[in-house]
Image: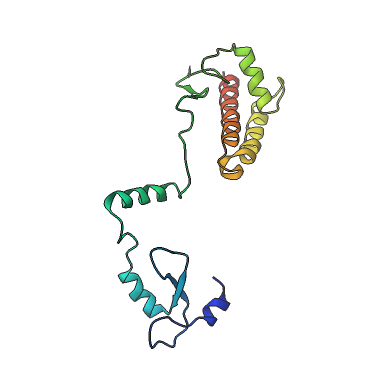
Amino acid sequence: MNKKNKIDNLCNHPDCEMAGEFRAPKNYQNLNDYQWFCLEHIKEFNKKWNYHLKMDADQIETDLRFDTIWRRPTTSFGSGRRFYDFTINGEDMGSFENPSKSTNQSNKLLLSLSELNLDINTDIKLIKKRYKELAKLHHPDVKGNSKKSIDKFRKIVEAYNYLLDRYKK
């Protein structure tokens, strides 16, 4: 909201000549269509406004759940039919590319290094630095929630976790 809108709009309350500085939705169907009120009348409006008025209990629960994820679709990370290579308490929970395919440790090391664009002579500081760069670049919040970007991000995280564990030993 810019200052020009504040000056140009009058309060929508009948018989009020004050400047309408505060916006409020006109109706429940179109929440982006606004009316303008002065401070006194926006307080009055807010006391009466009930966003969930015409919703039943299930609709309210669904709406609240969507608010907890900022109204964006989410998926569980590393679960379901494509469980990725995470270690839990040091126990390997699956193979790198495909849970049904087992890979030996040297192939896993090479895959992890290639995923982070590193060579075999790298150190822990470079691994952490490269991970941060790639994670920022390929994070689903930056790239969008496409399956391709989520898979790429998962592979980067998997490779980082594997290399971190390997280099700490």
Q: Is residue 10 above or below residue 45?
A: below
Q: In this view, does 37 lie above or below 133?
A: below
Viewer-proximal residue, 149 or 115? 149
Tell me residue 138's x, y (percent). 62, 38
Quarter placement of the C terminus: top right
Residue 120 falls left or right of residue 82: right
Q: Which residue is drawn at 55% across and 19% down?
A: 98
Residue 123 visible in the snapshot:
no
Q: Which residue is drawn at 58% across and 19% down?
A: 166
Viewer-proximal residue, 113 or 69? 69
- How many numbered marks, from 0 up? 0
In this view, the residue farthest toward the left is 57
Viewer-proximal residue, 129 or 143? 143
Quarter placement of the N terminus: bottom right
Give the image quarter of residue 120.
top right
Residue 36 visible in the snapshot:
yes
Q: Is residue 65 above or below residue 16?
A: above
Give the image quarter of residue 38.
bottom left
Colouring chosen for the image of the structure: rainbow
Give the image quarter of residue 36.
bottom left
Viewer-proximal residue, 79 or 93? 79
Q: Residue at x 68, y 30 (%)?
A: 126
